Amino acid sequence: MRFWSSSRPAASDVDEDAEEIPSQSALVPADSVAGRSLVIVIAIMTFLAALAANVAILVADASVEWRSDVAREATVQVRPVPGRNVEADVKDAAETMRRTPGVREARVYAKSESEALLAPWLGEGLNLSELPTPRMIVLKLDAENRADLDKLRMELERAVPNAVLDDHHVFIERLGDMARAAVAIAALIFVFILAAMAVAVASATRAAVATNREIVEVLHIVGAADSFIAREFQRRFMALGFRGALIGGGGAIAFFALAQFLAQRWRATGGGDQMEAMFGDFTIGASGFVVIVLLAGGVAALTGYLSQFIVLRHLQRLG
């Protein structure tokens, strides 16, 4: 393989054998301690990046389900007031709700059930019989035939002035804000992980260039194209990046598969129910697998591009 350029001075005084570089000799060593270390770093970073990306997807999907579930319910509070029969008011309010299009069910909570709702706030064992405890009516709304809640409030106010309809819009907004914050944090962690990986790749490339400095400079002096030298580094580092991304991506898929299996085992427990309510059943679905595959390919491409860019910058400084 000759690297002499026609623009270079004639090399009659250089031994012919010095012009030849064995084609089977790799410019960047195929396997080394530094290379194996870089594969481990890329695998860990890819695993963490895939974890952050899919957790963001899980939280976003769970948030949609949370808000959808909450939006299908509304509550009516009937407050006891002097001069009115609270039981009759509860019955009138429930009948008004049941006659309204878009309301599938109106469940009246008994007085003991309404008092039990206050127990977490007031403590156990407190006698609430003498307190003016509001009575609760839980409404199940039709998702397809949505009720006109503003009109419903007006009808309820005319029928039972001491009743208040709550459609949980404040709670839904807070759920949305919480989910957006969680997704933003996961996205920020994802960016930081990729930045840390880029720094590791850049450091490994500079170390490889420094280790092979004499070879790189000789090739540059005798006329080897900068693109050829950079491609050698790019090819080697892309292979290392692909290997690390494959390990990290495979580990992420195995993690989510194990998490889904354990979630199914724990589903019957109280903690399992709460985890499923928060994050679902840890099923990332086809979109999650696509994200991991794209991430692995992106990591390999990023590794190759960074190594090529750094080597070209180094060669440009050599002049």
Image: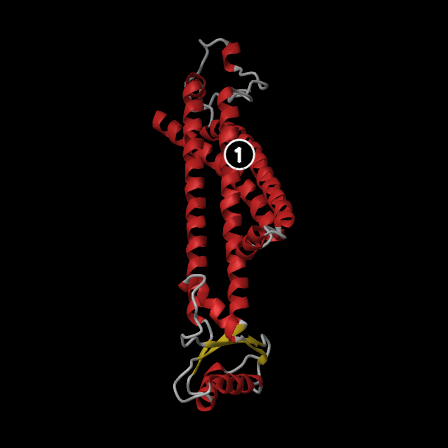
Q: Does the rendering let one see residue 103? A: yes
Say what amino acid the circle numbered 1 marks.
Answer: Ala
Q: Quadrant of the N terminus?
A: top right
Q: Residue 83, image x and y in percent?
A: 40, 89
Q: Does the rendering let one see residue 319? A: no
| Identity of the residue drawn at 55% across and 40% down | 296
Report the number of numbered marks.
1
Q: Is residue 40 above or below residue 180?
A: above
Q: Is residue 217 above or below residue 70?
A: above
Q: Is residue 282 above or below residue 4?
A: below
Q: Which residue is mark 1?
A: 43
Q: Residue 192, image x and y in percent?
A: 41, 42
| Identity of the residue drawn at 41% across and 55% down | 181
Please tell me how crowded label 1 is: few (under 14), some (14-19), or many (20+) other residues with Cα within 10 Å: many
Q: Residue 314, image x and y in percent?
A: 38, 28
| Identity of the residue drawn at 51% across and 57% down | 60
Q: Nearer the viewer, residue 55 or 291?
A: 55
- Could you tell me which secondary element the residue under label 1 belongs to? helix
Q: Is residue 130 above or below residue 185?
A: below
